[in-house]
Amino acid sequence: MQPLDPATLNTLTDYEDYSVTSHSYDTTRRPIGVEVILGCFAATNTPPLQEQVILDAGCGTGNYLQAIHDKVGICHGIEINDGMLAQAQSKLGNGSSVHFDHGSLLELPYPDEFFDGIMCNQVIHHLDDPMPTEDFPNVKTMLSACYRVLRPHGVLILNMCSRHQLLDGFWWADLIPRVVEQMAARIPSLELTGKMLEAVDFQLGGLIVPLHEVLQGPSYFDPRGPLKKSFRDGDSTWALLSEQELQTTLEQIRTLNENGDITQYLDEREKRRKRVGQTTFIFARK
Ligand SMILES: C[S@@+](CC[C@H](N)C(=O)[O-])C[C@H]1O[C@@H](n2cnc3c(N)ncnc32)[C@H](O)[C@@H]1O
């Protein structure tokens, strides 16, 4: 594989420092919706799931690959951050059925029609800074790259948060409204995502929302969780806060805990989360 052009590496938006985050990422992150992903890949059935060649685009520490690698044929993970990639490699090795590449989703270094399926979990919000003139140029580039490397009828699955889910699916959203809006602006709406998929000739399959799982696993329900840096590192929305905003928010969380109001606050937020979930899986076929 060709070494990456530094200009390409710079397209990664850098508000979250994944070289640091990689060390604690797995303490607060779970691969949710694995059965959704496997179901979408299996629906093709030619070849059968256990023979399919799958790409995890932006594989991070390899949580999703770890969950699916023994159920599919051959897996490839591509990741731009060295620290995240090192964690993935240490978990899964770089053997005959799981391969890792350091690279960018904007220039997928694979031959045309190489994959039966591609999953892209929680990466889209890193691809573009909000642009006044053009909508999500890097997401468009990434979708075109995915189209090229998928075989005909191959499946692309995008796992992303809708604006509604950012607002209602995470209990701390009311406490950090400015950066939740800022994060929402980084993510195309579900409608626009569908249009962008169709513009590169994908056929839309549908949307699935797993309501019973949370991205942070059991740690999500820790009422003091955000007081810990390792917890905040598991959700890049926290990285958008200024130091002053962070300190004010942490003080609010300490007060909610100390005066006992946190239980009612979390119960109310949990009702909202259960209605919308945290993330949406959009699947499409070449
Ligand atoms: C929130 S993490 C998700 C990781 C993994 N997919 C998961 O769900 O656990 C986002 C990941 O996308 C990676 N990433 C961001 N932009 C990328 C790009 N242009 N090419 C490849 N990886 C990228 C980041 O380095 C980070 O590891």
Image (tube, rainbow, N blue to C red):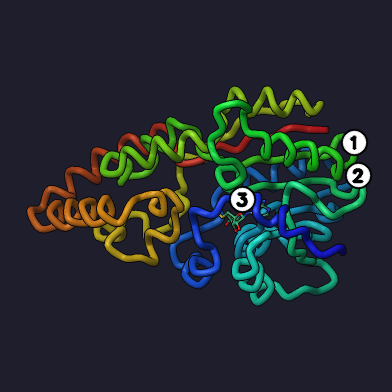
**Which residue is disc 1 drawn over?**
152
- The answer to which image quadrant residue 145 occupies is top right
Callout 3: SS: helix
Residue 105 vertical placement versus 283 (above, below): below
Q: Name the spot of residue 66 as percent of width and height, x first.
A: 65, 64
The tag earlier along the polypeptide, 3 or 2, is: 3
Residue 274 shows up from this direction: no
Cα distance, mark 2 to mark 1? 7 Å
Q: What number of labels is visible?
A: 3
- Left/right of residue 219 with respect to residue 246 in the rendered view: right
Residue 52 shows in this picture:
yes
Front one among 99 and 51: 99
- Vertical side of 132 occupied by 160: above or below: below
Marks 1 and 3 sit apart, C-alpha to C-alpha, by 23 Å
Q: The N terminus appears in which quarter of the rendering?
A: bottom right
Residue 160: horizontal and vertical position, in percent? 56, 40
| Residue nearest the observer in this picture, 97 or 172 | 172
- Mark 1 neighbour density, 10 Å: few (under 14) some (14–19) many (20 or more): some
Which residue lies under the disc numbered 2? 113
Query: Vertical placement of 250 versus 185: above or below?
Result: below
Relative side of 174 to 28, left or right? left
The residue type indicated by label 1 comes to Pro
Q: Is residue 284 left or right of residue 223?
A: right
Q: At 20% from the left edge and 43% from the top edge, which residue is drawn?
A: 265
Q: In terms of depth relative to the viewer, which is nearer, 191 or 47?
A: 191
- The quadrant of the rendering that contains the C terminus is top right
Residue designated by label 3:
34
Instruction: Report the Cα–Cα distance between label 3 and label 2.
Output: 24 Å
Q: Is residue 284 left or right of residue 188?
A: right
Type of residue at label 3? Answer: Val
